[in-house]
Image: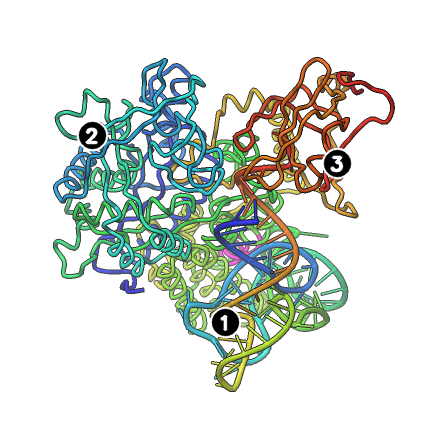
RNA sequence: AGCGGGAUGGGAUAGCCAGGAGAUUCCGCCGGGCUCAUAACCCGGAGAUCGGUAGUUCAAAUCUACCUCCCGCUACCA
């Protein structure tokens, strides 16, 4: 890449995706925030001027819809979540220099200012488009207020994104057959004036931008494809009242607000600005970070580094740099998109309660550093990583307790007992070289955005330390060769000090603890990596163990708890799904790094590709809930455009139903009429390929072998 | 079926972008050592044709093409 290595003379700013203010935080969120926090701390350790900022994402239709359902104002609703987030992050030592929210004054002002700038530069056009409208309520239905059919792939889609089909971002008015998600009313389209940001004019700029962009590969490759396919202009306004009013005189009467994705990333700037205003521009000047090229020769002087979840790459590599560029700000140096988290190998799912919640983790009494270490070092940033309590315990016990904690403790305890602190000596060449290497590796890791390597550095150094102390056996030297023993122990204290410095980014609390135990002055949060080579303090108190192990029984207990919770969430599926309405809603979240639902429960150990019998038994009463009927197919015709679907009318005695079934390739459609079948009669109706299907015809296996009766059962008889 | 991510010793991971020695580390296993340390630590060993095939190259885990399989999301298996 074309960027200069860190540390640079410029001012850096590190951000992480904005948590969307409509749900509890979980390990998926935490992964991104701890990675960015560790990266920012590592930047500080190598002497880069930097700030770490973020804020809550308050606007958008999911908040409005959820608030409406709870009967509170969107502001009240989102502020409550915002406050919870603001309280939670410090508990994980996620140390934002500023944490704001998108609904505050700074962001509102700045957003309007930037939009005016986009207008002034001629990148905003007013266009008349058709928007979904609820005729009964007489209100507009932007984004998630409406569902319908994707015009590109024909799938069921949300108003703003074809979430289930081709994954495209949908512009207002594009979705077909719209229905209000609030009232269920079919929506009609009305003509409205809206503002468009002409992103399509910026393809060349964006291509160049991507060529110079640092960070993870996925953040560079995916948008390239989108550009090749052709960029669409972006509608940046919505007909609703929750959001930032579109700047200008005539807009207020129309309830025209800016689309949430306009003001959300601007919070990165706003939050930096708030930080600057609080500490003073002489300490940190937000304009150097966001507008550094004004004062500097280089074109891209600000060192802007975004950490995001991989689901929001498009917003950060297309819309956002386009806005920054036109409004005269610097564009990002790097976008690092993290992978998802799985729990015990399965997708994290908030609605199924298969998640490790932030508060839950804390309530279990674990130190935040343990999770920080696990999340940042379990795999590369881009990689999906799995969380299980067993693996967690494994890594804590092996690497933190056994290697890092043990090394620091044994060396320092030896030193304390024999020398009341650091013995008289100077660092050996071998140890000095080892520490230098470790420092270099962290430097390199920062420049490669390799948070994992930043995290493993202190543990690797401790591993060397354990080997070193073992090889030199100070315990057998201490009587006969006191000088040699002193040398070894001095080296160990030096190594412990280096571990403290190296551990700071990923395990800030533990690092500070170790630093204090070593009798060092000040805080490890204020030193640079080179402090690892400075002579340790002469005296220190008796050390204590840095980490506590996680017992096997504890792991079993935690696993059981998680399993119970997932099971009970599954029981109450219907109800809980309504409350949680849709964690899918936080797809708008700027940091939603959970993998989404996955279900098929494990089917290992079963021969011949057959699914095992489900473990959960149901009661007879539940079986009684199934209304299975004998039916006779009356008519059958293929559905145009569908490969497999057949539209059937089936006589089930009490009535004739229209049912869609996937039989076309497997049966001769003309021969189906007259066939007796078994029908699941009280299944809720669904629409398949635009055709209503009221019930389900039972069939077995891939070949859709139809279930039938062999004697004289007549249509309408129940099957039991 | 579409899109995305993978495939490296028993399990989990690194290396791949910028091709070159005996392929990294952790867990597990076998054997040994140490006893300063939280049954922690250290050493040695077994164990990988780096998913397959073809190609580029003096040289491929790494680059190219095709293929297979796995995972996730989504879907016309209602």
Q: CA distance from mark 1 to mark 2?
A: 74 Å
Q: Residues within 10 Å of mark 3 (few under 14, many from 20)?
A: few
Mark seen at residue A661: none
Gap between marks 2 and 3 measured at Cα = 56 Å
Sequence order check, earlier mark of 1 and 2: 2
State yes or no: residue A409 in magenta: yes
Label 1: which residue? A484
What is the crowding at mark 1: few (fewer than 14 residues within 10 Å), some, or many (at least 20)?
some
> Looking at the picture, how far across and down is residue A711, in whole percent?
87, 23
In the rendered image, the vertical position of residue B64 relative to residue A560, given as above or below: below
Report the residue marked by disc 3: A700
Question: Of helix, strand and loop, which one carries label 2?
Answer: loop
Could you tell me which residue is drawn at 47 percent across and 50 percent down?
A376
Residue extending furthest toward the front: A670
Question: Which residue corresponds to the image point at 15% horizontal and 43% vertical from the top-left?
Answer: A122
Quadrant assignment, res A187 = top left
Q: CA distance from mark 1 to mark 3?
A: 78 Å
Nearer the observer, A472 or A118: A118
Q: Which residues are magenta?
A: A402-414
Q: Is residue A376 magenta?
A: no
Q: Secondary structure at mark 1?
A: helix
């Amino acid at each position: 890449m074309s960027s200069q290595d860190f540390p640079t003379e410029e001012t850096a700013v590190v951000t992480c995706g904005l948590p969307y203010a409509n749900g509890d935080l979980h390990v998926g969120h935490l992964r991104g925030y701890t990675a960015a926090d560790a990266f920012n701390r590592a930047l500080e350790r190598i002497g880069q001027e930097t700030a770490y900022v973020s804020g809550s994402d308050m606007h958008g239709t999911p908040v409005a819809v959820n608030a409406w359902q709870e009967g509170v104002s969107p502001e009240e609703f989102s502020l409550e979540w915002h406050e919870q987030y603001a309280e939670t992050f410090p508990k994980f030592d996620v140390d934002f220099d500023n944490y704001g929210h998108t609904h505050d004054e700074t962001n509102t002002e700045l957003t309007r200012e930037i939009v005016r700038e986009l207008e002034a530069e001629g990148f905003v056009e007013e266009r008349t488009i058709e928007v979904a409208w609820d005729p009964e309520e007489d209100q507009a239905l932007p984004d998630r207020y409406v569902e319908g059919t994707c015009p590109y792939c024909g799938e069921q889609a949300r108003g703003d994104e074809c979430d289930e089909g081709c994954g495209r971002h949908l512009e207002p008015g594009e979705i077909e057959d719209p229905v209000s998600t609030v009232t269920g009313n079919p929506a009609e389209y009305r003509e409205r004036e809206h503002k468009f940001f002409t992103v399509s004019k910026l393809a060349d700029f964006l291509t160049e931008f991507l060529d110079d962009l640092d960070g993870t590969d996925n953040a560079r490759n995916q948008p390239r494809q989108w550009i090749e396919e052709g960029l669409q202009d972006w509608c940046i306004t919505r007909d609703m009242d929750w959001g930032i009013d579109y700047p200008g005189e005539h807009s207020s009467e129309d309830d025209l607000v800016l689309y949430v994705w306009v003001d959300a990333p601007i919070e990165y700037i706003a939050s930096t600005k708030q930080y600057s205003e609080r500490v003073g521009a002489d300490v940190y000047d937000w304009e150097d970070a966001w507008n550094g090229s004004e004062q500097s020769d280089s074109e891209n002087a600000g060192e802007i580094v975004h950490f995001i979840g991989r689901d929001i790459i498009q917003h950060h590599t297309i819309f956002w740099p386009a806005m920054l560029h036109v409004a005269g700000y610097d564009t990002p140096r790097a976008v690092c998109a993290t992978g998802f988290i799985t729990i015990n190998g399965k997708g994290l799912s908030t609605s199924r309660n298969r998640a490790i919640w932030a508060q839950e983790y804390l309530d279990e009494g674990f130190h935040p550093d343990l999770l920080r270490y696990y999340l940042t070092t379990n795999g590369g940033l881009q990689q999906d990583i799995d969380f299980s309590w067993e693996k967690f315990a494994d890594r804590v016990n092996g690497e933190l307790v056994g290697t890092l904690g043990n090394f620091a403790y044994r060396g320092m305890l030896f030193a304390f007992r024999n020398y009341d602190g650091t013995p008289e000596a100077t660092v050996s060449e071998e140890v000095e070289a080892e520490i230098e290497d470790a420092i270099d590796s962290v430097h390199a890791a920062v420049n490669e955005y390799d948070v994992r390597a930043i995290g493993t550095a202190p543990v690797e150094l401790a591993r060397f330390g354990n080997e070193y102390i073992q090889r030199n056996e100070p315990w057998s030297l201490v009587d006969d060769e006191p000088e040699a023993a002193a040398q070894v122990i001095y080296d160990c204290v030096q190594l412990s000090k280096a571990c403290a410095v190296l551990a700071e980014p990923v395990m800030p609390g533990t690092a500070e603890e170790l630093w204090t135990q070593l009798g060092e002055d000040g805080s490890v949060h204020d030193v640079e990596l080179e402090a690892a080579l400075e002579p340790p303090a002469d005296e220190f108190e008796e050390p204590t163990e840095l980490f506590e192990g996680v017992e096997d029984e504890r792991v079993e207990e935690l696993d059981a708890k998680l399993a119970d919770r997932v099971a009970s969430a599954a029981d109450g599926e219907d109800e809980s799904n309504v409350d949680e309405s849709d964690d899918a809603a936080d797809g708008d979240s700027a940091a939603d790094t959970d993998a989404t639902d996955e279900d098929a429960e494990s089917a290992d150990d079963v021969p011949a590709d057959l699914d095992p019998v489900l473990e959960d038994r149901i009661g007879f009463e539940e079986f009684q809930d199934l209304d299975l009927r004998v039916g006779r197919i009356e008519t059958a015709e293929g559905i145009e455009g569908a490969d497999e679907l057949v539209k059937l009318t089936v006589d089930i005695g009490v009535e004739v139903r229209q049912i869609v079934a996937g039989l076309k390739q497997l049966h001769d459609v003309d021969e189906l009429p007259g066939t007796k079948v078994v029908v699941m009669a009280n299944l809720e109706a669904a629409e398949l390929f635009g055709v209503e299907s009221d019930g389900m015809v039972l069939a077995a296996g891939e070949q859709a072998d139809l279930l039938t009766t062999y004697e004289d059962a007549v249509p309408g008889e129940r099957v039991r």
